[in-house]
Amino acid sequence: MEFNGTVLVVDDEPHIRKYIGLILRKLGTPTVVEAANGEEAIAAFAQHNPDLVLMDVNMPIMDGLQALERINAEHPDALVVMLTSLATRHVVERCLELGAINFVRKDTPKETMAKVIADTIADHFAEG
């Protein structure tokens, strides 16, 4: 699979954004746009209209749940995968209720995270 779309990576930690970007580049040559909080994510989504969003739940200024709700209200077809360090059942359920298409823990091994992202992309961008 070769994914060459635009991906918005949202996390308040720059090293996590870079790490996710490296994983994405193993799946093809996507354009990676970064944002550090939910407010930046909403603005970046409006500007770049990404094919996929990978967004942290816990961030300052505006958290990922608030940003997810706003993005999906304005762009109902948005494909958002939520990322977090602390995945409680309540948080996972809330993300799915707000329209996330998948959920990945940030401490997932790199190969497994790449597979989850690749499978999510394949499910939503299958040719044919």
Image (spheres, rainbow, N blue to C red):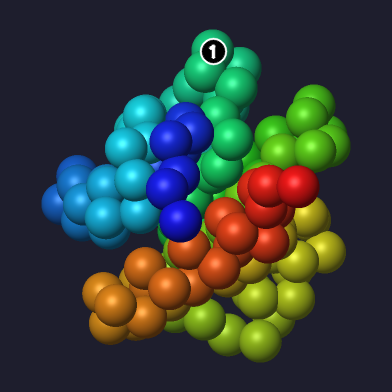
Return the residue found at the far left: 15
Q: Name the residue at 15% across, 52% down.
A: 15
Q: How many marks?
A: 1
Q: Is residue 26 left or right of residue 115?
A: left
Q: Is residue 2 visible?
A: yes
Query: Residue 22's spot in the image, x, y percent?
Result: 21, 52
Query: Residue 123's spot in the image, x, y percent?
Result: 68, 61
Q: Is residue 61 visible?
A: no
Of residues 93 and 51, the one nearer the viewer is 51
- The amino acid marked with disc number 1 is Gln
Query: Residue 100's spot in the image, x, y percent?
Result: 70, 58
Q: Is residue 36 above or below residue 116?
A: above
Q: Is residue 48 above or below residue 86?
A: above
Q: Name the residue at 76% across, 47% down.
A: 128
Q: Which residue is denoted by mark 1 in the rendering?
A: 47
Q: Determine the image quadrant of residue 90.
A: bottom right
Return the residue found at the far front: 128
